[in-house]
Amino acid sequence: MRAVVTGGAGFIGSHVVEALLGRGDEVHVLDDLSKGTRERVAAGAELHVGDIRDPDAVFDAIRPEAIFHLAAQADVRVSVERPDVDADVNVLGTVRILEAARRSGAKVVFSSTGGAIYGECTRPAAESAERSPLAPYGTSKLCGEEYLATWNRLHATGHVSLRLANVYGPRQEPHGEAGVVAIFMGLLHTGGTPKIYGDGSQTRDYVFVADAVHAMLAAVEHEGGVFNVGTGTETSVLELYEAIQRATGVIREPAFAEARLGELQRSVLDISLAGRELGWRPGHSLEAGLAQTWAWVVQE
């Protein structure tokens, strides 16, 4: 398969690139390197430095069969402060990727978000649950999903949207809009003190990056739709920190700070639909995923 991975120089994208290369696929990366790095792009993949809002020259030259669209403006704070920038990248960029894909007849697998779309959960959220974004970032991702669904109806395509839970694993840098696993492990490794906001009872669904990648590879074979990608298990911040201490062998009391305004208290995904239709289930326990992540942190 000839594939393009947008954002393939970043955290999740670089793992997608490696998985595709491991299957023997021809892999191209479209990345503006605003967050990703050249060093993250595996040997064997061709890097095209460019913007997803202007993909035509690259796509027309490659004529891809599949596009894994991960490039995005992913900082929730930026989306609140500059919703126009967020929409420009995440909405207009996705539309231009869809049109470039249509010209070459390519299948699109779109990286969306679970927590930012569903909002506060009272139970594991299924794909049919009410969608209540609390920030423009979630709204822009939801808008991207709707464009994929419209293209499927209008052009008889089979594009797939994956609503990812909190993805963690090797190569997630402990800064910027990094996940809490990377932040906590980075601080423990460098002698810092992790900070927990509120009382630490807020929960999230943490999915290991390799499992998220396997879902993307399964999705490219599906006829189209929207699927949750998580574990179906919620873990509180306190429970996560205890698990991280066990995985790292570093025991350190965290600091506590005032709860952040607007932070979700409960976020967990129902992944049964992906199991039925994609034949996908997560393969890593939290403990196993944290161990692999720590092994990467200490060798960097």
Image: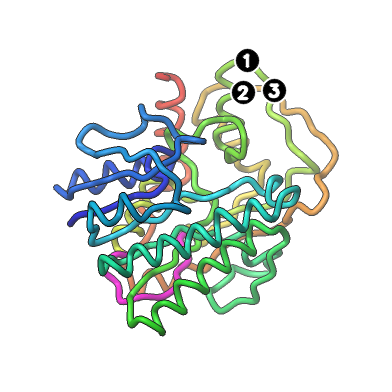
The residue nearer to you, when weighing 210 against 38, is 38
On screen, residue 8 versus residue 112, left or right, reads: left
- Quote the CA–CA distance across marks 1 and 2: 6 Å
Look at mark 2 in the image and give the residue it sits on: 187
Q: CA distance from mark 3 to mark 1?
A: 7 Å
Q: Is 126 in front, or is 163?
A: 163
Kindly report the distance in space between the C-alpha atoms of the residues bearing marks 2 and 3. Answer: 6 Å
| Residue 44: % across, % down | 20, 36
Indicate the position of residue 15 as horizontal and vertical percent values. 34, 42
Q: Residue at x 63, y 60 (%)?
A: 138
Q: Is residue 293 left or right of residue 199?
A: left
Q: Are marks 2 and 3 in contact (CB under 8 Å)?
A: yes
Of the residues shown, which amino acid type is indicated by label 3? Thr
Residue beneath the point at 39% across and 69% down: 160
Of labels 2 and 3, earlier in sequence is 2
SS at mark 3?
loop
Residue under the image location 27 percent in, 60 percent down: 66
Q: Which mark is residue 193?
A: 3
Which quadrant does the N terminus fall into? bottom left
- The residue pinned by badge 1 equals 191
Circle 1/circle 2 CB separation < 8 Å = yes
Q: Residues within 10 Å of mark 2 (few under 14, many from 20)?
A: some
Element under disc 2: helix
Residue placed furthest toward the left: 24
Dot 3 crowding, Cα within 10 Å, few <14, some 14–19, many 20+: some
226 in the magenta segment? yes
- Quadrant (top left, top right, bottom left, bottom right) of the C terminus: top left
Say what secondary structure mark 1 lies in: loop
Q: Which residues are magenta?
A: 219-229
Residue drawn at (66%, 19%) of the image: 192
* Observer-nearest of 80 and 259: 80
